[in-house]
Image (cartoon, grey):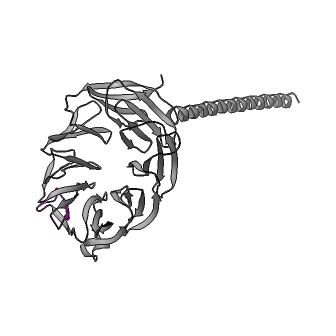
Amino acid sequence: MEQVTSLERRNRRDLERERKFRRLRLILFIMIGAVAALACVFFYYQYVNGVYEDYTVLEEYEKADSSMVKYISYQDKILKYSNDGASVLDSHGKPVWDGSYEMKNPTVSICGDYVAIADIGGKSIYVFNGKDSGTEIKVLHDIIQADVASQGVVAVAMEDGDSNRIDIYDPYQSGDSLRVEIPTSVNEDGFPIDIALSDDGQKLVTAFINISDGVLENKVTFYNFDEVGQNDINRQTGMVNLEETLLSKVDFLSNDKVCIYTENGFSLYSMKERQEKIADITFEETIKSVMSTQHYIGVVLEEYSGTEKYRLMVYNLNGKNILEKELDFDYDKVQMTEKDIIFHSDLDCNIIRLNGRKKFHKVFDQSILALLPYDDNRKYYLVEESGIQRIQLKNQ
C-alpha cells in the first residue's frame, strides 16, 4: 500500500513539474513573439516609413571633374561621362572600368551590364561591357537616338536626308556588326524622334512625327525580329496612329511591356509577341516630368488650382493608379527607384516613398550635382561640386 502511495506522489510531482515547464515555455514564447512584433513595428516605422532629416558620411573622396561631367546610377555604382570619356566608380571611388572617346553630345543607354554612349548628331557609338575599354560602332549618318539591349546589341535611328533609317548592330559578333536595316521615308513615315529596344534585343518600338498639309501625324511602329515577325515586311508587326496628341518618347519598361509617352499622358502595351493595348492614361494638366522603373510609371503634373505646386501620380504596369500626392516644393531633377522618388534642385532635396510618405528632406550647403541610390534603403551617393560622398540617412 505504501509503495502505491509513493508512486502516486511521484507522478503528481512529475505532472506538476511538467505543468510548470509548459507554463514557462508558453510565457517564453509569448515574450519572444512580443519582442519580434515590436521589432517588426520598429523596422516598419524606421525603415519603411521612417522620416530622416540628416545623414552620416560613410565615405568621402575628392573629384577633379569639369562641370561638363554627368553622373548616373549603374548597378549600385556611379557612371560618370562627358565629351571625352566615361568611367564607372565603385563605392570607394575606385574606377571599375573606363573608356575614352571624343563626342560633342553624348547620351547614355544602359541595360544590364552594357552601356552604350552615342554621339547625338555625330556618327559614333561606344559600347561598354565592364570588361574592356569599349567597342566603337561607326555609322554612316547622323545619330538621332540609340538604345542598347542586355547583350550589347544596339539600335540606332539616323538622319539621312529624305530617307532616314534605323539600324541594329551587334558589336560583339564576328564580321559585319550590322544585323538589321529598316529604311524609313520622311514623306511617308515622318521624322524619327525616339526608339526603344527590348532587353533581349528581339523587339523594337519607334516613334515618328510628321506634318502633312499642316496636319500633325504621330506614328508608333512595332517590330519583332524573332520568328513571330519573319513574315512581316521589315519585321513590322504593327502600327499605332496618334493624330491628336504629340509624341514625346517610347520605352520598354520590361522585356514585354512598352510605354508610349505623349504630351498629355501615356499608353501601355504588352508585346510578348505582337502589341496589345493595356491602358490609356490622359491628364488635363501639363506634364512636367515622367520617370519609370521595371514596375512603375511616375508622372509629375503642374498644378494650376489649389495651393500646391505639383501633383505626383504613380501607376503600375497594368495602368492602375497606386499613388496620388500633392507636392509643395520645386525641383530640377527627378528619378524613381523601386522604392523611392528622388527630387532635387541646386541645394534642396526631397525623397518620397512609393507609398506617398515623406522619407527625407535636406537643404545642403553645396550644389547637388546628383543624389543616386545605393544598395540599401537609406544609403545614397551624394555628388557635390567638391567631391562624392557615400551617405546613410539618419534622424537628427
The vertical placement of 95 against 227, above or below, is above
Q: How far across and how far down the image is residue 134, in percent?
A: 16, 47
Q: Would you identify the image quadrant in which residue 160 lies?
A: bottom left
Whether residue 10 is visible, yes or no, is: yes
Q: Residue at x 13, y 58 (%)?
A: 139
Please indicate whether residue 326 sits to the left or right of residue 118 in the image.
right
14 or 330, which lies in front? 330
Position of the N terminus, as image quadrant, is top right
Q: How far across and how far down the image is residue 96, in percent?
A: 22, 37
Magenta range is 161-176
Q: Would you identify the image quadrant in which residue 274 lies?
A: bottom left
Residue extending farthest to the top is 396
Residue extending farthest to the right is 1
Residue extending farthest to the front is 214
Whether residue 202 is visible, yes or no, is: no
Q: In the rendered structure, does residue 163 fall within the stretch colored magenta?
A: yes
Q: In the rendered structure, does residue 224 fall within the stretch colored magenta?
A: no
Q: How far across and how far down the image is residue 51, in percent?
A: 50, 31
